[in-house]
Amino acid sequence: MKGGKRPGAGRKKGIPNKASAAREAAIAASGLTPLEYMLSTMRDEGKPLALRLDMAKAHLHLDL
């Protein structure tokens, strides 16, 4: 075979590349993901209302 698409070649669907896997591992090791931070800020009644509303708006734009 010379070039072209080959069945079974390449990374399988759902398997992250090395950069994505390393980034996700670093986030998990830090203890608090950006989403968890956003949700905790949004629900904290001690935080300013403007900040909480910004977190709620940002949460709507996430691809979950």
Image (spheres, rainbow, N blue to C red):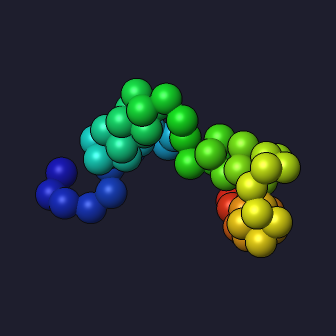
Residue lying at 56% horizontally and 48% vertically, measured from the top left? 34
Residue at the outermost left position? 2
Depth order, front residue of 36/43 = 43
Depth order, front residue of 18/8 = 18
Residue lying at 54% horizontally and 35% vertically, measured from the top left? 32
> x and y percent of residue 55 in the render?
72, 62
Give the side of residue 16 with respect to residue 10, left or right: right
Q: Is residue 12 above or below residue 5?
A: above
> x and y percent of residue 27 in the render?
43, 38
> x and y percent of residue 2 in the render?
15, 57
Give the side of residue 37 with respect to residue 16, left or right: right
Residue lying at 33% horizontally and 57% vertically, measured from the top left? 5
Residue 8 appears in the rendering: no
Q: Is residue 26 above or below residue 42?
A: above
Give the side of residue 45 with respect to residue 10, left or right: right
Give the side of residue 12 with respect to residue 62, left or right: left
Q: Is residue 21 above or below residue 3?
A: above
Depth order, front residue of 60/53 = 53
Occupied quadrant, residue 29: top left
Count of all numbered marks drawn on residues in the image = 0
Residue lying at 72% horizontally and 43% vertically, measured from the top left? 40
> x and y percent of residue 49 in the render?
82, 66
Residue 36 appears in the rendering: yes
